[in-house]
Amino acid sequence: MNKKTLKIVLAVAALLVCGVACWLMFGNKGGQARKDPTTTAATEAPLTEAPGTEAPLTEAPGTEAPVPAGTTEAAPATEPGAEDGHITITVQDKDQKVLVEKNVGFKAGQTLADLLPENFANVTIDNGMLMTIESLTTPADWSSYIALFINGEYAMEGIMTLPFADGDKIDFVDTVYIPMETTAEAEEFDGHITITVQDQNNNVLAEKTVGFKAGQSLADLLPENFANVTIDNGMLMTIENLTTPADFHTYIAFYINGEYAMEGVMTQPFADGDKIDFIDTVYIAP
Amino acid sequence: MKKPPLPVYEIVVMAALTAILLLQKQLLTFLPNVTLNFFLILLYSKVLGLGRTAAIVTVYLLLDSTLWGSLNPIFTTAQWIGWMWGPLITCTLLKKTESSIPLAFANMGFAFLYSWTMIVPTALVLTNQIRNLKAYIIADIPWELMLAVSAFLPTLLLHEQVETLFRKLWNRRMN
């Protein structure tokens, strides 16, 4: 093997290593930003493992679940509609009166986000969330939202990722959103965690004990309980008065029970009684 | 007339080389742990020697740390040590090595040495935050790989040509 060939082989090998490193850093959307918050952390996220407890959340249509019909999570686009078939999609108003009902054919790999604009009027999808469909509209103040149900059960995923099969029934129901403060007493949480926000000197800027339900992630809990929460591509960019600056010389690291969290806010599992710390951290770039 | 220890034109060239080091670092900040620092520092070490490269690295590091707000005795010292592994080994053990392949592997090693050096101040300073050092070190591996590849590839593909050119220009200026 001459030197030139050896160089090419080594360069290709290096690129492969680079690819593996990139996959480890960026492949996990829910990973925690660490050395550079433009990226995600190293570990493979078990996306099937629901944050919070393992019990599935199944709510009947009509209950006020404060989750819109959509998800900000990136869509894998391989799971939904595993085989060709037909599904029934309805659009219902607040009284669950069916406004539109259609039997829709789909091809393997298609998501609801693909099917809706082709089959319904006035479909708007913003950041993976269904904002309008037919005459239903999500108002700017989010006093109502379009909830998604599959075969009568509250969907655990959004229109970008929800898997469905031939014969399934999908309902989009206009649902009143009742803020946490008014439902807190009535709601039964599956557990409570303590969340703190700390500056670079570990001064606690905010501390709250937060109730969670099975299946909820930190990404769900933070915007409901803290001010100025921005999550970008699965990474916590701002919370309270902590901000990740544009040059990323600091980032918001987070710890679970005092240990550096190996996953991000989208996927980090937690349990009742856990303590989560979000700490402003200086990034020492090479 | 007695020759000055460091002629003005050498200082000017070294300042320009420091600027190049700093500029590429700033330009590549959008790519995590991708930097031409290792490639350039190895190049400087081969052509300019240990003393001049150490001076360039020191000035670069002070400017860079000031820009990034990470100027801190513990971190900055550790970074200096991390960056100086390359010039030190290149100007001693690898003094006679000219082929880009062993130099590329050496540079990859320098990237790992830099990363491991930085674990020490991280563990010292952030003990209250990083209570699980093992998890931190494991999480660091892909970042280390990224840094190693960014040190390896440019050296493998560009070092020989750039060194020839740089040496030619440097010697012409010096003569």
Image (tube, helix red, strand yellow):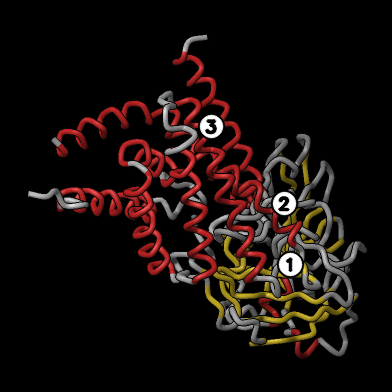
Q: Residue A67 in the image: x percent, y percent?
A: 73, 70
Residue beneath disc 3: B105
Residue beneath disc 2: B138
Q: Total of numbered circles in the picture?
A: 3
Structural distance between the alpha carbons of marks 2 and 3:
22 Å
Question: Foreground residue, A162 or A276?
Answer: A276
Question: Foreground residue, B175 or A201?
Answer: B175
Amino acid type at image mark 1: Ala
Residue beneath disc 1: A147
| Label 3 secondary element | helix
Quick one: which residue is furthest to the top in this view? A1
Marked residue chain, label 2: B
Q: What is the crowding at mark 2: few (fewer than 14 residues within 10 Å), some, or many (at least 20)?
A: few
What residue do we see at 59% from left, 75% from top? A280
Q: Residue A61 in the image: x percent, y percent?
A: 84, 68
Q: Is A24 placed left or right of B5 in the picture?
A: right
Q: Earlier in the sequence, mark 2 or mark 3?
A: 3
What residue do we see at 72% from left, 79% from top? A177
| Label 2 secondary element | helix
